[in-house]
Image (spheres, rainbow, N blue to C red):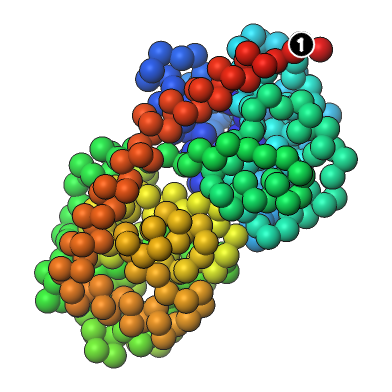
Amino acid sequence: MVCPYQWDIPGGVQSHVRDLAETLIAAGHRVSVLAPGDEDAPGRPDYVVAAGKAVPIPYNGSVARLQFGLVSASRVRRWLKQGSFDVVHVHEPAPPSLSLLTVLLADVPLVATFHAAASRSRFLAMFDGVVQAVLERLSGRIAVSQAARKLIVEHLGADAVVIPNGVAVAHFAGAEPLPGYPRDPGLGGTLGFIGRYDEPRKGMSILLEAMQQLVLHRPGVQLLVAGKGDEAAFTAGLPAGLADNVTLLGLLSEADKASLLRSVDAYVAPNTGGESFGIILLEAMAAGTAIVASDLQAFRLVLEDGRCGLLFGNRDVAELARSLDRVLADPDLRGQLTQASAEVVRPYDWGVVAAQVLRVYEIAMAAYVPG
């Protein structure tokens, strides 16, 4: 597999590649993952081959750390030659990245997964001819959601099978809460947020505005924030009166992330756009945590139009505050949401998802014509 984004910086694609790789390894397959990253970086799994440093490039409303160029191409060639792979699975092949280089250089069955679901893609527009050449070399195409598939159809006139992101259901369902949590409901409730809190499209500013309204009648409400960002700037910029209601936890391990989701009364996803799927929602669902999320298409599909979580109007601070108050005040509502979530999340378990991906591999291998 090829991950286009720097391995040691948390992100949805990196998590997807890691979990799929480890699921396939556990099933007895030999897997190698090529990704940007320092060879000496601590904690890198044995199955990951570090391809060197990446450079930051704006992409899909965020900043992606990608790797491209002649040196990168030589590393891709060496990895392909040494691997003697039956199939190569690249992720996000449109941006200038290791994935794109691999598609252009590999002479093996190729499968690509498209993750992004922006309404328009700068890279697809800039490199239309290159991307068309990429598509012609692919034996299999996967989109993680209908939104991601729509982007492929509208930009490229191609199609893809939809296979969703996976989640390790048992890992989240069985996690132990953080020390001291869950708190007594009489204290006002506990909310959780995980993500790059200083990235505008993740919606932290909207959540903090809603918190200002919420504390007026829930003075003890607590918001636990985990993820990457400028901690000093975040703390200094907290609105007046919220200093005692917001706790910044920094980057968490996968185990601690699961513990956080088991520690809160509700998980909040105030994202404003650019989401193709919403894997964190599935993780919260697996953990048995109620959800309040923006009414984005990707989130609405995961939450089945509100059956598994409360949806509020995108960027509507007042509605978010009301939704948070409602879910915190009503344990029966939280129970209904989490019961529905437990049923809906089962087909997303990585064992089920990986089997679908393997079927695409088999079809790609059967359809492949060398040269």
Q: Quadrant of the C terminus?
A: top right
Horizontal and vertical percent position of residue 9: 54, 45
Give the position of the N terminus as an image quadrant. top right
User: Would you place residue 102 above or below residue 61 in this image?
Assistant: above
From the viewer's side, name the closer residue of 158 and 221.
158
Instruction: Identify the secondary structure beneath mark 1.
Output: loop
Residue 327 versus residue 361 in the image, above or below: below
330 relative to 94, above or below: below
Q: Position of residue 216 (x, y in %)?
A: 29, 90
**In the image, 186: left or right of 104?**
left
Q: Residue at x 70, y 47 (%)?
A: 153
Q: Looking at the image, which residue is at 36% across and 81% down?
A: 321
Q: Residue furthest bottom?
A: 216
252 left or right, relative to 358:
left
Using the rendered image of the protein, determine whether residue 260 is visible from the camera's viewpoint. Answer: no
Vertical placement of 354 versus 301: above or below? above
- Report the residue marked by disc 1: 370
Displayed quadrant of residue 217: bottom left
Horizontal side of residue 153 vs 85, given as left or right: right
Q: Position of residue 361 (x, y in %)?
A: 56, 21
At label 1, the amino acid type is Pro
Q: Looking at the image, which is closer to me, 31 or 274?
A: 274
* Res. 100 image quadrant: top right
Task: Give the x, y percent position of residue 214.
Answer: 31, 84
Residue at 85% from the left image edge and 50% from the top image edge: 126
Give me the residue at 59% from left, 53% from top: 147
